[in-house]
Amino acid sequence: MAFEARNLSDGFGRRFSYVRLSVTEVCNFRCTYCLPDGWKKTGPLSFLTPAETANLAAAFAEVGVSKIRLTGGEPSVRPDLAEVIAHLAAVEGITKIAMTTNGWNLDRRVAQWRNAGLSHLNVSVDSLDRERFRHITGHDRLPAVLAGIDRALGLDFTSVKLNAVLLKDTAEADFDVWAEFVRHRPVAVRFIELMRTGDNADYFAANHVRGSIVTDWLEASGWQLQPKLKDGGPANEYAHPDYAGRIGLIAPYAAGFCDGCNRLRVTARGKLRLCLFGEGGCDLRDLLQKADDRPALIERISGALTGKPVGHRLKDNLPGDLRHLAELGG
């Protein structure tokens, strides 16, 4: 009998097929826009277990979710990451398992993750200039990260994508370099507009640049906007006949950005977050211990969605209670 799922929707008619699941709050990078002083432990590291993540995914699958993205912090700091992936891959109805990583362990472990069931890979690479990369991340790891990306491209992933935060001093100067990078590599590079969080107000004011500089450059250079996938993320991606890869933009400050929201977030400790820039959340962990709790878990998730707002309030400089992006994986 074929698997059938009900649809999970909110009060604005938006349907949710995509969950971003943080598996750790720990990050080993010191990115200038997120954790410039590095991650600091504030309590016990009691993050969701592989079995709990599987119970969570099974409940979401019953209400129409087919895609899970693993985020952090940095997911690869978990020694049991492959086990987490394997548990999710065994859940009926979950057809896409994605992960966003800073690439620290990519070259050494990407084959293990692929074998466990990871199907989609995103790597954060904020610059292809080695010194700029070191300045932004706090680590001279660019050659190893790029080697990991090329290794991943040989492992039959459904997609490999790169994320680069759009910063004032690394924006337009890098566009031609990125275009050359994707000339023969079938990867999508997506620039992400710098977002205001609770901890980065001064940095944001000094470094934010509008995403339109990306789309203006792409359109002037002959790149064409591509249609979005049903369960895709918020990026607008462009293609060019002379290039194997794509270049895109995630622009949270653009008008209508939240209109097509199709994703929910769960923290590493099991709290449902309805918006990256919202407040509070709905604790799910007490219902993640056994499959028998699934009906109550689905009811709690569905009930929480009645409180999902129509959109964030970033334009009003109100990032909710998000202190930094590592808390929820962006």
Image: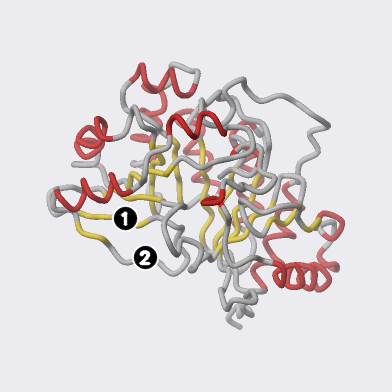
Check the image and name the residue furthest to the bottom: 1
Q: Secondary structure at mark 1?
A: strand
Percent position of residue 219, x then y: 19, 53
Number of numbered discs visible in the structure rendering: 2
The residue under the point 61% across, 78% down is 7
Mark 1 vs mark 2, CA separation in Å: 8 Å
Q: Amino acid at mark 1?
A: Glu
Task: Give the vertical position of 13 relative to 139 (above or below).
Answer: below
Q: Residue furthest front?
A: 316
> Foreground: 207 or 260?
207
User: Is 54 situated left or right of 126 in this image?
Assistant: right
Quadrant into which the N terminus falls: bottom right
Q: Is residue 20 above or below residue 202?
A: below
Q: Nearer the viewer, residue 29 or 52?
A: 29
Q: For residue 148, what is the image quadrant?
A: top left
Q: Residue at x 66, y 34 (%)?
A: 78
Q: Is residue 88 left or right of residue 131?
A: right
Q: Is residue 24 above or below residue 294?
A: above
- Which label's residue is closer to the chain start, 1 or 2? 2
Residue at image x 45%, y 46%?
121
Kind of residue at badge 2: Lys
Write down the residue under mark 2.
228
- The location of residue 40, given as percent across then percent down, is 71, 24
Question: Which color mode does the image show?
Answer: secondary structure
> Label 2 crowding class (10 Å Cα cut-off): few <14, some 14-19, many 20+?
few
Residue 242 in the image: state x and y as whole percent: 12, 49
- Residues at marks 1 and 2 touching, judged by CB atoms closer than 8 Å: yes
Q: Which mark is residue 59?
A: none
Residue tagged by mark 1?
Answer: 237
Q: Quadrant of the C terminus?
A: top right
Instruction: Identify the element where label 2 is drawn.
Output: loop
Question: Looking at this view, is 151 or 196 the one in front?
Answer: 196
